[in-house]
Amino acid sequence: MSVVARQGFKYSLIGYFGFLLGTISAIFIFPYDMEFYGKLRYIMPTAEMLLPIVVFGLSFSNVKFFHQTQKDGKNQNFLWLSLVGILFNFLLFCVLFFLFFHFFPQFKSLQLWKMKLLILPLILVMGLSAIFNKYISNFKRIVVPNIFENIFPKIANLGAFSLFFFLGVSEKGSYGFFLGMFILSFVGYIFYANKLEKIKPDFSTDYIRTDRLWKEVLNYSFYGFLGNIGNYIAFRVDNFMIGEFLNFEENGVYSIILSILSFTLIPQMGLFNISAPIINKTIAEGEFEELDRFHKKTSLTLFFLGAVLFSCILVGFPYLTTFIKNGEQLRQAEPVVWILGIAMIFDLATGFNGHIISLSKHYRFNIVIMLFLAITTIVLNYLFLTKTQFGIIGIAMATAISLTLFNMIKIYFNYVKFKVFPLTIEMMYVLIICTLAITLAIMFPVTKSNLLNLLYKPGFVLLVIFGANHVMKIFPIENYLNKKFFKSLFKF
């Protein structure tokens, strides 16, 4: 078994384990104290939102220029200079951070200022870790970095919450554990990188100045910075703005709903790694008809499976909340499930639009639309929070609108440039069937047992969808759920 296949299989296992750990914790543990969980869900997304400013694309440059620097025997020199760059950027960021609050003291009421002693160190540790994460990936080792990147943060959340709520540790002590897990992961990165190749500190600037290589690195890093900051802001700003404009309790409720809805994204986790090289190959060879066929096929797969899972969530959510501590708060926020879920299903229907763009010569356009998404999301969130009384429902509406516009722009761009289009008539059939199944399930009588309701209503939805699909032959599910497929799961 090749290194790539072995690493890919282990990577997937860890990815699914991390997903289950995070989701189960969010549903059955974190609801015990929505406010403290809301604080935890404010800290990390806020740090991640500011992280690209400190990293400034240097992590991507450690991949882009690795083969060149390794050939010249200067890959570790490049690594150490990148780490120095992170430290310099962090110090500059801190100076600007404190100057801003010094000259504009009215903003010191922000939670960002109040939690600065936790958020700022977290940004530094995450920035240094980001460099090692990308550096290690050059050795075709992605499993251990995936543990540090995905499992450790979930343990940090779960551990800090458990210490605070179940063991009575103070908030400061729990935050100390939270930050400590990230420091531990950073130390782990160093030890693992040293295991792959003996680390030798080298701070010389002679190589980077040769043929003005620094200019090329800076230019590439800047594009990485633009794309990265747009991505982080667009998908982390919700938790930040809820924490600032509403309260941490609402932030906890919103985060738990997101965790439940993330079930619809399970099909996407495996398909991305499979599809990326195929998309890259078809674009490189100019086989756009094949690309269109593949795009439609994968989009239908993602949409069908996502729609099935979402339909089950919709009819089962009211009864699931009865088994969750403080579930009534989640029940009151049910419109968030509908609004965000519909936007996420449309996102799945558009398939790998973004990957087609990023793997083509038009990759810079991804930066433009990502910044558009970030700005639109911020503006809409602000308007809904300050001009309406919708609360987290308004946040959901803002996110849904900006994400839908984002996907529509990508659909149009790919159709004009590559003549590929993800949406098909089969998706309309799936939509009609799922709507019918949801409507009937909601209309069906409610029993006195919430457990029975939780089981039989989603079960009925599955029966209707798969029954109609069997008759209408919309999606070839037999090609996936068969004996050969299940056997392949155990072939390592």
Image: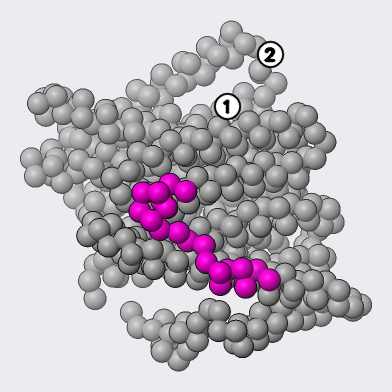
Residue 175 belongs to magenta span: no
Mark-to-mark CA distance, 1 and 2? 16 Å
**Could you say which is closer to the camera, residue 156 or residue 477?**
477
Mark 2, Cα crowd under 10 Å, few <14 / some 14-19 / many 20+, is few
In the figure, is residue 270 to the left or right of 189? right
Residue 316 drawn at (x, y percent): 76, 70
Q: Main secondary structure of the magenta part?
A: helix
Residue assigned mark 1: 116
What residue is at 62 percent from the left and 72 percent from the top? 430
**Could you say which is closer to the camera, residue 252 or residue 200?**
252
**Considering only vertical position in the picture, is 86 above or below 370?**
above
Residue 461 drawn at (x, y percent): 72, 78
**Considering only vertical position in the picture, is 103 above or below 301?**
above
Residue 414 belongs to magenta span: yes
Hey, what amino acid is under mark 1? Lys
Mark 1, Cα crowd under 10 Å, few <14 / some 14-19 / many 20+, is some
What residue is at 17 percent from the left and 35 percent from the top? 77
**Could you say which is closer to the camera, residue 242 or residue 191?**
242
Quarter the N terminus occupies: bottom left
| SS at badge 2 | helix
